[in-house]
Image (spheres, rainbow, N blue to C red):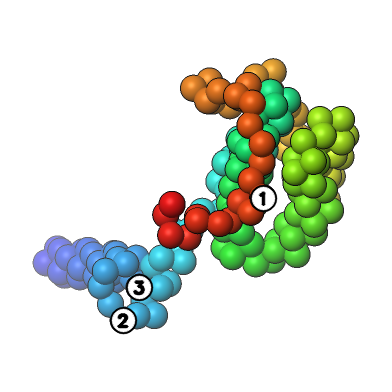
Amino acid sequence: MKRRLILGLLGLLAVAAVGLAAEHMRDIYKGSLEERVNALASIQPGLGTVMIEYGDRFTNTYYAAKGGNWALAQYELKEATEIQEVGEITRPGKAGLLKEFEHSYLDPLEKAIEAQDWNAFETRFEAAVAGCNGCHAATGHPFIHYKLPPAPMQNYIDFNLKTKPKVNIEEGEEEGK
């Protein structure tokens, strides 16, 4: 009986020690630089999480262009591209596909925005949607099928504000202007 109690307590101590070690390994403020970097890497979002924001911004790009708010369309597309970069870094195995999608579909969409050409935009947006769904199918996710919602993702943004795209959208962004 005593032996079982001692073995049980030793087992509990071992489990606790492993748990504490695992907790320490995930603490971004403790441990060696490598342990802290590994802890940060372990909590990075997966591509599914990134794609939620990507889809929202992609949808907003459409409604901003449709409403003639070309500056907002340009901004939303730029933000979609930036969140895509998070996916490229955290999921390097998908980086090539994401970059190819950007060059094949988002760059032409940006050109239509810069030209404030709704007809070209709509055609290129439809092609981008087909590209999205084709990529999902090709990567084993055919059950993820983007379709344009009947309204923008946010109802607090004026998508009909008439604006023009910026000549250089990156200008002033780094300084927080």
Residue with the most extreme top position:
150
N-terminal-most mark, 1 or 2: 2
Please tell me which residue is depicted at 73% across the width and 57% down the height of the picture. 98
The label number, if any, that marks residue 78 in the structure image? none
Q: Which residue is mark 2?
A: 32
Task: For mark 2, give the secondary structure.
Answer: loop
Q: CA distance from mark 1 to mark 2?
A: 45 Å
Residue with the most extreme left position:
2
Question: Residue 30, how many percent across, how many down?
Answer: 25, 72
Task: For mark 3, give the secondary structure.
Answer: helix
Closest to the observer, 44 or 89: 89
Amino acid marked by disc 3:
Arg
Which quarter of the figure is the N terminus placed in?
A: bottom left
Q: Which residue is mark 3?
A: 36
Please tell me which residue is depicted at 83% across the width and 44% down the height of the picture. 131
Question: Residue 142, how many percent across, how many down?
Answer: 79, 40
Question: Residue 104, how many percent across, how many down?
Answer: 84, 53
Amino acid marked by disc 1:
Val
Q: Which residue is mark 1?
A: 167
Confirm or deny contact between disc 1 and disc 3 (CB under 8 A).
no
Confirm or deny contact between disc 2 and disc 3 (CB under 8 A).
yes
Task: For mark 1, give the secondary structure.
Answer: loop
Please tell me which residue is depicted at 63% across the width and 54% down the height of the picture. 168
Q: CA distance from mark 1 to mark 3?
A: 41 Å
